[in-house]
Image: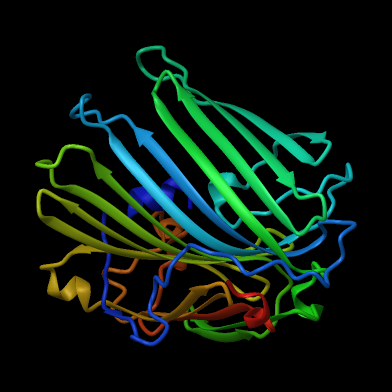
Amino acid sequence: MSDLIKRCLTTGAAVALTVPLTGCFPQGFNGLPFVNSSLDETSPEGIWMLVTTENTTEPNESDSMNPFVYEAQSREMVAITANEEGVYEVTRCDSSWRNDYVIVPTANGYEATLTEVGSTDETGVTPQTLTDLTVTYSSDFQSLDAVASRVTTPVGESTTLTIEGVKVSDSADFNNSDEVTFGFNLDFINLGTAGVQAEAIAECVSIARGVQTTEQEDDVWEFTQDVYTFFDDQNRQVQYYRFNQNIDNVVTNSLGATISTDATFTLYVNSCTDTEVACNDAAQWIESSSNSIAGVSFDIDYQVVDNTYVINPLALTPWTAFLWPHDGDFMHANVSATIDQYQQFED
Protein backbone atom coordinates (compact mmCIF):
# COMPACT_ATOMS: atom_id res chain seq x y z
CA MET A 1 0.00 0.00 0.00
CA SER A 2 1.38 3.43 -0.91
CA ASP A 3 2.40 6.03 1.66
CA LEU A 4 -0.09 8.38 -0.03
CA ILE A 5 -2.97 6.08 0.87
CA LYS A 6 -1.74 5.62 4.43
CA ARG A 7 -1.54 9.40 4.92
CA CYS A 8 -5.01 9.91 3.51
CA LEU A 9 -6.47 7.38 5.95
CA THR A 10 -6.04 9.97 8.67
CA THR A 11 -8.00 12.67 6.82
CA GLY A 12 -11.41 11.97 5.79
CA ALA A 13 -13.78 9.07 5.12
CA ALA A 14 -16.55 6.70 5.92
CA VAL A 15 -17.38 3.25 7.11
CA ALA A 16 -20.44 1.05 7.48
CA LEU A 17 -19.32 -2.53 8.00
CA THR A 18 -21.16 -5.80 7.49
CA VAL A 19 -19.19 -9.06 7.92
CA PRO A 20 -21.15 -12.33 7.63
CA LEU A 21 -20.36 -14.88 10.36
CA THR A 22 -19.91 -17.67 7.83
CA GLY A 23 -16.28 -17.73 6.71
CA CYS A 24 -15.51 -14.87 9.09
CA PHE A 25 -11.86 -13.71 9.16
CA PRO A 26 -9.52 -14.65 10.68
CA GLN A 27 -9.54 -18.46 10.86
CA GLY A 28 -5.84 -18.92 11.59
CA PHE A 29 -2.47 -18.65 9.92
CA ASN A 30 -0.84 -21.78 11.35
CA GLY A 31 -0.39 -25.07 9.55
CA LEU A 32 0.14 -26.30 6.00
CA PRO A 33 -1.15 -29.31 4.05
CA PHE A 34 0.92 -32.48 4.08
CA VAL A 35 3.31 -32.87 1.16
CA ASN A 36 1.60 -34.37 -1.90
CA SER A 37 4.03 -37.14 -2.81
CA SER A 38 2.58 -37.46 -6.32
CA LEU A 39 3.96 -34.06 -7.37
CA ASP A 40 7.15 -33.61 -9.40
CA GLU A 41 10.34 -33.81 -7.31
CA THR A 42 12.73 -32.36 -9.91
CA SER A 43 11.65 -28.70 -9.86
CA PRO A 44 10.02 -26.18 -7.49
CA GLU A 45 7.89 -24.76 -10.31
CA GLY A 46 4.22 -24.74 -9.43
CA ILE A 47 1.63 -23.31 -7.07
CA TRP A 48 2.65 -23.10 -3.42
CA MET A 49 0.87 -22.36 -0.18
CA LEU A 50 2.90 -20.13 2.14
CA VAL A 51 2.43 -19.06 5.75
CA THR A 52 4.48 -16.12 7.00
CA THR A 53 5.27 -14.44 10.30
CA GLU A 54 6.74 -10.93 10.50
CA ASN A 55 7.96 -9.05 13.57
CA THR A 56 9.05 -5.41 13.57
CA THR A 57 10.32 -3.02 16.21
CA GLU A 58 9.89 0.66 15.33
CA PRO A 59 11.05 3.80 17.16
CA ASN A 60 8.43 5.81 19.05
CA GLU A 61 9.13 9.51 18.58
CA SER A 62 7.04 10.49 21.61
CA ASP A 63 8.62 7.93 23.94
CA SER A 64 12.03 6.54 23.00
CA MET A 65 11.86 4.03 25.87
CA ASN A 66 8.55 2.62 24.59
CA PRO A 67 8.95 1.47 20.96
CA PHE A 68 6.18 0.23 18.71
CA VAL A 69 6.03 -3.53 18.14
CA TYR A 70 4.39 -4.85 14.96
CA GLU A 71 3.44 -8.50 14.44
CA ALA A 72 1.89 -9.83 11.23
CA GLN A 73 0.89 -13.18 9.75
CA SER A 74 -0.33 -14.19 6.32
CA ARG A 75 -1.42 -17.17 4.26
CA GLU A 76 -0.78 -16.99 0.53
CA MET A 77 -1.29 -19.08 -2.58
CA VAL A 78 1.49 -18.14 -5.02
CA ALA A 79 2.92 -19.15 -8.38
CA ILE A 80 6.65 -19.92 -8.45
CA THR A 81 8.45 -20.02 -11.80
CA ALA A 82 12.05 -19.55 -12.94
CA ASN A 83 13.18 -15.97 -13.56
CA GLU A 84 15.40 -14.93 -16.48
CA GLU A 85 18.46 -16.25 -14.66
CA GLY A 86 16.81 -19.61 -13.99
CA VAL A 87 16.25 -18.97 -10.27
CA TYR A 88 12.91 -20.01 -8.78
CA GLU A 89 12.07 -16.79 -6.95
CA VAL A 90 9.32 -16.88 -4.30
CA THR A 91 6.39 -14.61 -5.12
CA ARG A 92 4.72 -12.59 -2.35
CA CYS A 93 1.43 -10.69 -2.27
CA ASP A 94 2.84 -8.37 0.42
CA SER A 95 3.88 -5.24 -1.50
CA SER A 96 6.62 -4.40 1.01
CA TRP A 97 8.43 -7.60 -0.08
CA ARG A 98 7.77 -7.31 -3.84
CA ASN A 99 11.07 -5.69 -4.81
CA ASP A 100 13.82 -6.05 -7.41
CA TYR A 101 16.36 -7.88 -5.30
CA VAL A 102 19.91 -8.81 -6.20
CA ILE A 103 19.61 -12.60 -6.51
CA VAL A 104 22.47 -15.04 -5.90
CA PRO A 105 21.71 -18.75 -6.48
CA THR A 106 22.70 -21.27 -3.81
CA ALA A 107 22.92 -25.06 -3.87
CA ASN A 108 19.34 -25.43 -2.63
CA GLY A 109 17.71 -22.05 -3.25
CA TYR A 110 18.92 -18.47 -3.36
CA GLU A 111 19.88 -15.40 -1.38
CA ALA A 112 18.36 -11.99 -2.13
CA THR A 113 19.61 -8.60 -1.00
CA LEU A 114 18.43 -5.03 -1.45
CA THR A 115 19.84 -1.66 -0.38
CA GLU A 116 17.47 1.32 -0.33
CA VAL A 117 18.58 4.89 0.40
CA GLY A 118 15.96 7.36 1.61
CA SER A 119 15.74 11.14 1.36
CA THR A 120 17.96 13.27 3.56
CA ASP A 121 15.98 15.02 6.30
CA GLU A 122 16.33 18.56 7.63
CA THR A 123 19.05 17.46 10.06
CA GLY A 124 21.18 16.00 7.29
CA VAL A 125 20.45 12.36 8.15
CA THR A 126 19.98 9.94 5.25
CA PRO A 127 18.26 6.66 6.21
CA GLN A 128 19.39 3.42 4.62
CA THR A 129 17.50 0.12 4.60
CA LEU A 130 19.25 -3.21 4.12
CA THR A 131 17.18 -6.32 3.33
CA ASP A 132 18.51 -9.89 3.31
CA LEU A 133 16.39 -12.91 2.35
CA THR A 134 17.45 -16.57 2.21
CA VAL A 135 15.17 -19.16 0.57
CA THR A 136 15.87 -22.88 0.96
CA TYR A 137 14.02 -25.60 -0.97
CA SER A 138 13.86 -29.19 0.26
CA SER A 139 15.81 -31.75 -1.77
CA ASP A 140 12.57 -33.04 -3.33
CA PHE A 141 11.25 -29.50 -4.03
CA GLN A 142 8.08 -30.19 -2.08
CA SER A 143 8.62 -27.66 0.72
CA LEU A 144 10.56 -24.48 1.45
CA ASP A 145 11.75 -22.34 4.32
CA ALA A 146 12.83 -18.72 4.20
CA VAL A 147 14.21 -16.21 6.68
CA ALA A 148 14.71 -12.50 6.16
CA SER A 149 15.81 -9.38 7.98
CA ARG A 150 15.30 -5.72 7.20
CA VAL A 151 17.14 -3.01 9.14
CA THR A 152 16.87 0.77 8.69
CA THR A 153 19.70 2.91 10.04
CA PRO A 154 20.06 5.25 11.80
CA VAL A 155 16.28 5.19 12.38
CA GLY A 156 16.45 1.93 14.30
CA GLU A 157 13.57 0.06 12.65
CA SER A 158 14.18 -3.70 12.52
CA THR A 159 12.13 -6.49 10.91
CA THR A 160 12.43 -10.27 10.84
CA LEU A 161 10.42 -12.54 8.53
CA THR A 162 9.95 -16.30 8.41
CA ILE A 163 8.19 -18.23 5.62
CA GLU A 164 7.15 -21.86 5.40
CA GLY A 165 5.72 -23.32 2.22
CA VAL A 166 4.41 -26.50 0.59
CA LYS A 167 4.00 -27.11 -3.13
CA VAL A 168 0.38 -27.95 -3.93
CA SER A 169 0.46 -28.14 -7.74
CA ASP A 170 3.04 -28.78 -10.47
CA SER A 171 1.36 -26.19 -12.66
CA ALA A 172 2.13 -22.53 -12.01
CA ASP A 173 -1.01 -21.63 -13.99
CA PHE A 174 -3.89 -21.20 -11.53
CA ASN A 175 -6.42 -21.46 -14.37
CA ASN A 176 -5.16 -24.85 -15.59
CA SER A 177 -3.99 -26.63 -12.46
CA ASP A 178 -5.13 -30.21 -11.82
CA GLU A 179 -4.80 -29.75 -8.05
CA VAL A 180 -6.05 -26.20 -7.44
CA THR A 181 -9.36 -24.55 -8.31
CA PHE A 182 -9.10 -20.82 -8.97
CA GLY A 183 -11.88 -18.29 -9.37
CA PHE A 184 -11.88 -14.58 -10.12
CA ASN A 185 -14.75 -12.16 -10.67
CA LEU A 186 -14.86 -8.38 -10.35
CA ASP A 187 -18.10 -6.53 -10.92
CA PHE A 188 -18.26 -2.81 -10.34
CA ILE A 189 -19.68 0.61 -10.98
CA ASN A 190 -16.80 3.08 -11.31
CA LEU A 191 -17.57 6.77 -11.83
CA GLY A 192 -21.12 5.78 -12.71
CA THR A 193 -20.16 3.19 -15.34
CA ALA A 194 -20.83 -0.52 -14.77
CA GLY A 195 -18.48 -3.30 -15.77
CA VAL A 196 -17.43 -6.90 -15.15
CA GLN A 197 -14.13 -8.78 -15.34
CA ALA A 198 -14.73 -12.51 -15.08
CA GLU A 199 -11.20 -13.89 -15.39
CA ALA A 200 -7.56 -13.12 -14.64
CA ILE A 201 -4.14 -14.78 -14.67
CA ALA A 202 -3.14 -15.11 -11.02
CA GLU A 203 0.28 -14.66 -9.50
CA CYS A 204 -0.83 -14.72 -5.86
CA VAL A 205 -3.81 -14.54 -3.50
CA SER A 206 -3.40 -13.74 0.19
CA ILE A 207 -5.02 -12.79 3.47
CA ALA A 208 -2.90 -11.05 6.11
CA ARG A 209 -3.40 -9.62 9.58
CA GLY A 210 -1.11 -7.27 11.49
CA VAL A 211 -1.18 -5.74 14.98
CA GLN A 212 0.98 -2.83 16.13
CA THR A 213 1.16 -1.91 19.81
CA THR A 214 3.43 -0.24 22.32
CA GLU A 215 5.32 -2.28 24.88
CA GLN A 216 4.19 -0.11 27.79
CA GLU A 217 1.01 -1.56 29.32
CA ASP A 218 -0.42 1.78 30.49
CA ASP A 219 0.06 3.43 27.08
CA VAL A 220 -3.18 2.79 25.15
CA TRP A 221 -2.05 2.57 21.52
CA GLU A 222 -3.06 -0.21 19.17
CA PHE A 223 -3.33 -0.49 15.41
CA THR A 224 -4.71 -3.54 13.60
CA GLN A 225 -4.99 -4.22 9.88
CA ASP A 226 -6.62 -6.94 7.80
CA VAL A 227 -5.48 -7.05 4.17
CA TYR A 228 -6.91 -9.08 1.27
CA THR A 229 -4.76 -9.11 -1.88
CA PHE A 230 -4.67 -10.48 -5.42
CA PHE A 231 -1.90 -9.82 -7.97
CA ASP A 232 -2.02 -10.90 -11.60
CA ASP A 233 0.91 -11.79 -13.85
CA GLN A 234 1.25 -8.14 -14.97
CA ASN A 235 1.60 -6.80 -11.40
CA ARG A 236 -1.96 -5.47 -11.38
CA GLN A 237 -3.84 -5.87 -8.15
CA VAL A 238 -7.11 -6.10 -6.29
CA GLN A 239 -6.59 -5.19 -2.65
CA TYR A 240 -8.97 -4.42 0.20
CA TYR A 241 -7.92 -3.44 3.71
CA ARG A 242 -9.46 -2.63 7.08
CA PHE A 243 -7.56 -0.56 9.65
CA ASN A 244 -8.61 -0.02 13.26
CA GLN A 245 -6.69 2.34 15.51
CA ASN A 246 -7.08 3.03 19.24
CA ILE A 247 -5.05 5.90 20.67
CA ASP A 248 -5.90 6.81 24.26
CA ASN A 249 -9.35 5.24 23.73
CA VAL A 250 -10.08 7.31 20.61
CA VAL A 251 -11.05 4.65 18.06
CA THR A 252 -10.67 5.27 14.33
CA ASN A 253 -11.93 2.75 11.76
CA SER A 254 -10.72 2.85 8.17
CA LEU A 255 -11.61 1.02 4.97
CA GLY A 256 -9.63 1.07 1.75
CA ALA A 257 -9.34 -0.49 -1.68
CA THR A 258 -6.83 -0.42 -4.51
CA ILE A 259 -8.32 -1.81 -7.72
CA SER A 260 -6.08 -1.95 -10.78
CA THR A 261 -7.10 -4.51 -13.41
CA ASP A 262 -7.72 -4.88 -17.13
CA ALA A 263 -11.24 -3.59 -16.62
CA THR A 264 -10.96 -0.65 -14.23
CA PHE A 265 -8.84 1.43 -11.87
CA THR A 266 -9.73 3.25 -8.67
CA LEU A 267 -8.75 3.89 -5.06
CA TYR A 268 -11.16 4.16 -2.13
CA VAL A 269 -10.05 5.52 1.25
CA ASN A 270 -12.43 6.00 4.18
CA SER A 271 -11.73 6.79 7.83
CA CYS A 272 -13.77 8.01 10.79
CA THR A 273 -14.03 7.67 14.53
CA ASP A 274 -16.60 5.28 15.92
CA THR A 275 -18.76 8.20 17.13
CA GLU A 276 -19.17 9.86 13.71
CA VAL A 277 -22.54 8.54 12.58
CA ALA A 278 -22.74 10.17 9.14
CA CYS A 279 -19.20 9.10 8.36
CA ASN A 280 -19.86 5.53 9.41
CA ASP A 281 -23.02 5.36 7.30
CA ALA A 282 -21.32 6.71 4.18
CA ALA A 283 -19.88 3.39 2.97
CA GLN A 284 -20.80 -0.26 3.23
CA TRP A 285 -18.45 -3.24 3.36
CA ILE A 286 -19.83 -6.76 2.95
CA GLU A 287 -17.24 -9.48 3.45
CA SER A 288 -16.86 -13.24 3.41
CA SER A 289 -13.38 -14.75 3.57
CA SER A 290 -11.59 -18.03 4.24
CA ASN A 291 -8.05 -18.74 5.39
CA SER A 292 -7.09 -22.37 6.09
CA ILE A 293 -4.98 -25.25 4.81
CA ALA A 294 -7.72 -25.74 2.20
CA GLY A 295 -6.84 -22.43 0.53
CA VAL A 296 -7.41 -18.70 0.52
CA SER A 297 -10.48 -16.79 -0.64
CA PHE A 298 -12.24 -13.48 -0.17
CA ASP A 299 -15.51 -12.02 -1.40
CA ILE A 300 -15.75 -8.30 -0.61
CA ASP A 301 -18.29 -5.76 -1.80
CA TYR A 302 -17.22 -2.18 -1.02
CA GLN A 303 -20.06 0.28 -1.72
CA VAL A 304 -19.98 4.08 -1.82
CA VAL A 305 -23.15 5.34 -0.15
CA ASP A 306 -22.20 9.01 0.33
CA ASN A 307 -19.17 10.37 -1.52
CA THR A 308 -18.96 13.32 0.85
CA TYR A 309 -16.78 11.09 3.02
CA VAL A 310 -15.39 8.51 0.59
CA ILE A 311 -12.27 9.76 -1.17
CA ASN A 312 -9.91 8.75 -3.94
CA PRO A 313 -6.45 10.08 -2.97
CA LEU A 314 -5.68 10.69 -6.64
CA ALA A 315 -8.68 13.05 -6.97
CA LEU A 316 -7.47 15.73 -4.57
CA THR A 317 -6.27 18.21 -7.22
CA PRO A 318 -8.34 20.30 -9.68
CA TRP A 319 -6.87 18.32 -12.59
CA THR A 320 -7.83 14.93 -11.17
CA ALA A 321 -11.09 15.79 -9.41
CA PHE A 322 -13.01 13.80 -12.05
CA LEU A 323 -11.74 10.64 -10.31
CA TRP A 324 -13.80 11.35 -7.19
CA PRO A 325 -16.13 8.38 -6.47
CA HIS A 326 -19.83 8.75 -7.27
CA ASP A 327 -22.65 7.82 -4.93
CA GLY A 328 -23.65 4.29 -5.88
CA ASP A 329 -20.19 3.26 -7.08
CA PHE A 330 -18.94 -0.09 -5.80
CA MET A 331 -16.11 -2.60 -6.18
CA HIS A 332 -17.15 -6.23 -5.64
CA ALA A 333 -14.40 -8.84 -6.01
CA ASN A 334 -14.61 -12.59 -5.47
CA VAL A 335 -11.20 -14.31 -5.56
CA SER A 336 -10.46 -17.87 -4.46
CA ALA A 337 -7.68 -20.45 -4.71
CA THR A 338 -8.46 -23.79 -3.07
CA ILE A 339 -6.76 -27.19 -3.03
CA ASP A 340 -9.06 -29.82 -4.52
CA GLN A 341 -7.92 -32.83 -2.45
CA TYR A 342 -6.42 -31.14 0.59
CA GLN A 343 -8.07 -33.59 3.03
CA GLN A 344 -5.78 -36.34 1.81
CA PHE A 345 -2.78 -34.39 3.03
CA GLU A 346 -4.24 -32.63 6.05
CA ASP A 347 -2.43 -32.97 9.38
- At x 76% / y 38%, what residue is drawn? 110
- At x 81% / y 79%, what residue is drawn? 176
Q: Nearer the viewer, residue 222 or 166?
A: 166
**Residue 177, placed above or below residue 83:** below
Q: Nearer the viewer, residue 176 or 30?
A: 30
- Residue 313 found in image quarter: bottom left
Image coordinates for residue 194, horizontal then vertical, percent: 54, 87
- Left or right of 7 on screen, residue 2: right
- At x 90% / y 57%, what residue is drawn? 42
Image coordinates for residue 30, horizontal then vertical, percent: 48, 62
- Left or right of 200 on screen, residue 147: left
- Residue 115 found in image quarter: top right
Check the picture and name the quadrant holding the C terminus. bottom right
Image coordinates for residue 75, horizontal then vertical, percent: 54, 63
User: Which residue is most to the top?
Assistant: 124
- Left or right of 337 on screen, residue 252: left
Using the rendered image of the protein, determine whether residue 230 is visible from the camera's viewpoint. no
For the rendered model, the colour scheme is rainbow
Q: Nearer the viewer, residue 232 or 28?
A: 28
Using the rendered image of the protein, determine whether residue 164 is visible from the camera's viewpoint. yes
**Residue 345, placed above or below residue 54:** below
- Left or right of 313 on screen, residue 61: left
- Residue 307 found in image quarter: bottom left
- At x 47% / y 18%, what residue is drawn? 126
Q: Nearer the viewer, residue 324 or 48?
A: 48
